């Protein structure tokens, strides 16, 4: 059997909880009706660059060490984004190099990693990609690309998503080597802020507003049970709410060109007689919240809004119309693609030098495991993690004690989504979060799907001990230890179980603080705060309002001239 083609179509910041998929009728037909949808698909880190690094490497961010979008002022968890990805040698082995090594033709069109910009980026084509059309400037109109190492500036009338669609069609019909299977990453910027829609869609959904769940702008009584800096946030203003509604409408509008592109790509696969041997996956790098827990529009938190993302698939052996509740994560994508590419081999010849933290989803895609099991044997505990990366939340909050250069600290946590596990975890549907401050959150997702009522203080102490013990293991796991959980993770060893049950609530908090250090901002006495966020920026004339970074929140409408200005200076901060 010929190895299959693989397409990964990944949007940027697309939510599930705010129902963005319901506004995409072509996706509904092509993927929800003709393909398979996974209802419990989680990105481990709800932020662009660490999430994309996880997908490329098949590793959690505590193993890639790509913790943020490039905030090098984070002294505890140095990030570095694309620069660090290159400097640490992570580009030398990605899903692209793995598939290229087993005979695949590989391509990327769209966004790569945050920080891939500046004077030296255009000439850089990562190992493993035969075709490279990666964005250097993420403008929705007139984007700038690196085409196989050559900078290409498009006319200001060219809409980014349409260009990407046309490039894919050209690849499928003309560019590709028709003697090889292909792996194609399609990564448009929509619906990320500023979510500029195509002009043909800019008047749609005039009455749409983001959903107001019970987690939206909650009362003081509810808010005080939140952790760290979140509990101190003031109520949202009407101006903020109106801005988020406008942002939400533009997100829906920007997704219409995505929806049209999906239809065009599937039509081209059919015309080229490729459909029957092509797996087509649709997902996002992270989600988006809208005023939940008083946090303005953004991501980075462990809540469903930020880490539960779309994941749909169509292809050979994938049953139409199936909606699976199996727990899967983006760390599983690389092992899945590798499995699809090599399962026709008589012997597995692919050597991967680093441990893959995920596992192949092929048995789930092919119906070899139940779609809605009572016990999630594939995975029952998903890891969620964020290290130091905090919300770029705007100057309105500058008087809060946790405010630092447009950011809120501390925002370091580890969390786990536990769904229908063995032993103590049977018949559970939980979100458990541990913050570097020692604070904890626990939600019963069956009765509290929007994570409003934090029950950790009243929960059974044995359950909290078990969750904390499980999370401590997941938080530094590597390879198969991330999914083949040891018996004591669910109470199989009585002595360990007894020892866990004996810890007091305060002992648990102390243990959390001991193993999970908080973000440590740099020593501000070493340089003048007015010159910027990084020492090397001291002699650069970075114009206001960008001398301290990006002064807008994710939901703000940013003027086009400010977007262009930021595009010229962003690499100074990343």
Image (spheres, grey):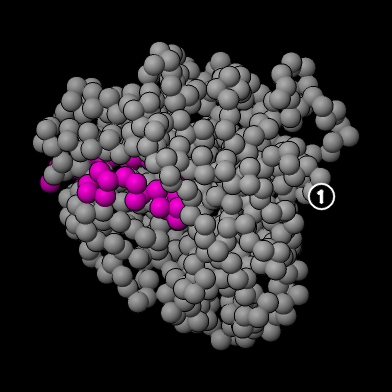
Q: Is residue 203 magenta?
A: no
**Depth order, front residue of 354/27:** 27
Which residue is at a point 74% across and 15% down the rendered structure image?
A: 541
Horizontal and vertical percent position of residue 165: 29, 29
| Neighbour tally class for label 1: few under 14, some 14-19, many 20 plus, Cα within 10 Å | few
Name the image quarter holding residue 87.
top right
In the image, 499 versus 11, the foreground residue is: 11
* Quarter of the rendering containing residue 222: bottom right
* Label 1 element class: loop
Is residue 16 magenta-colored?
yes
Is 466 on the left or on the right of 514, as rendered?
Answer: left
Q: Residue at x 48, y 37 (%)?
A: 192
Identify which residue is drawn at 55% across, 50% down: 290
Q: Residue furthest right?
A: 525
The x and y percentages for residue 154 are 40, 15
Judge from the rendering whether residue 529 lies leftward or rightward of residue 139; answer left or right.
right
The residue segment tinted magenta is: 1-30
Residue under pointer 1: 401
Q: Is there any visible trace of residue 486 in the rendered image?
A: no
- 179 relative to 164 in the view: left or right: left
Front residue (pair 58, 88): 58
- Quadrant location of the C terminus in the rendered image: top right
Outermost front residue: 207
> Can residue 21 be seen in the rendering of this structure?
yes
Residue at the image position 23 percent from the left and 38 percent from the top: 263
Number of numbered tags placed on the structure image: 1
Q: Position of residue 250 (x, y in %)?
A: 45, 37
């Amino acid at each position: 059997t010929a190895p299959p083609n693989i397409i990964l179509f990944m949007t940027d910041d697309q939510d599930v909880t705010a129902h963005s998929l319901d506004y995409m009728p072509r996706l509904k037909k092509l993927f929800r009706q003709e393909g398979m949808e996974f209802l419990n698909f989680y990105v481990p880190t709800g932020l662009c660059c660490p999430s994309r690094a996880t997908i490329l490497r098949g590793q959690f961010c505590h193993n890639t060490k790509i913790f943020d979008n490039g905030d090098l002022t984070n002294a505890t968890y140095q990030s570095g984004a694309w620069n660090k990805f290159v400097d640490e040698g992570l580009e030398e082995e990605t899903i692209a190099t793995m598939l290229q090594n087993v005979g695949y033709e590989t391509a990327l069109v769209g966004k790569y990693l945050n920080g891939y910009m500046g004077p030296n980026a255009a000439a850089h084509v990562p190992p493993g990609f035969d075709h490279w059309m990666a964005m250097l400037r993420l403008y929705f109109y007139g984007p700038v690309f690196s085409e196989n190492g050559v900078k290409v500036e498009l006319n200001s009338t060219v809409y980014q998503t349409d260009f990407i669609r046309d490039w894919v069609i050209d690849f499928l019909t003309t560019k590709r080597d028709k003697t090889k299977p292909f792996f194609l990453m399609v990564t448009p910027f929509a619906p990320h802020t500023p979510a500029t829609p195509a002009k043909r869609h800019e008047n749609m959904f005039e009455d749409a507003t983001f959903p107001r769940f019970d987690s939206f702008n909650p009362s003081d009584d509810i808010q005080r049970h939140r952790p760290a800096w979140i509990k101190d946030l003031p109520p949202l203003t009407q101006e903020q709410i109106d801005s988020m509604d406008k942002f939400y409408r533009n997100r829906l509008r920007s997704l219409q060109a995505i929806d049209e592109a999906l239809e065009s790509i599937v039509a081209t696969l059919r015309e080229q007689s490729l459909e029957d041997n092509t797996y087509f996956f649709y997902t996002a790098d992270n989600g988006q919240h809208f005023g939940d827990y008083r946090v303005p529009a953004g991501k980075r938190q462990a809540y469903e809004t930020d880490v539960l993302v779309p994941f749909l698939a169509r292809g050979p052996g994938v049953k139409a119309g199936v909606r699976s509740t199996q727990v899967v994560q983006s760390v599983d994508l690389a092992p899945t693609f590798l499995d699809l590419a090599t399962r026709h081999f008589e012997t597995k010849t692919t050597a991967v030098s680093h441990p893959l933290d995920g596992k192949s989803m092929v048995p789930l895609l092919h119906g070899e495991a139940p779609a809605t099991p009572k016990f999630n044997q594939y995975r029952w505990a998903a890891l969620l993690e964020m290290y130091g990366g905090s919300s770029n939340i705007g100057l309105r909050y500058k008087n809060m004690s946790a405010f630092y250069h447009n950011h809120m600290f501390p925002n370091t946590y580890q969390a786990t989504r536990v769904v229908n596990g063995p032993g103590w975890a049977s018949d559970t549907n939980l979100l458990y979060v541990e913050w570097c401050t020692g604070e904890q959150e626990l939600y019963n997702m069956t009765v509290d799907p929007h994570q409003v009522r934090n029950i950790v203080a009243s929960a059974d102490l044995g359950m909290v001990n078990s969750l904390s013990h499980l999370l401590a293991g997941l938080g530094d796991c590597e390879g198969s230890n991330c999914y083949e959980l040891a018996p004591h993770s669910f109470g199989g060893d009585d002595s360990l179980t007894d020892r866990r049950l004996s810890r007091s609530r305060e002992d648990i908090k102390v243990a959390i603080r001991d193993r999970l250090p908080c973000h440590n901002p740099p020593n501000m006495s070493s340089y003048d705060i007015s010159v910027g966020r990084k020492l090397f920026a001291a002699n650069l004339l970075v114009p206001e309002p960008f001398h301290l970074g990006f002064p807008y929140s994710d939901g703000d409408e940013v003027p086009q001239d400010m977007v262009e200005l930021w595009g010229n200076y962003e690499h100074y901060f990343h």
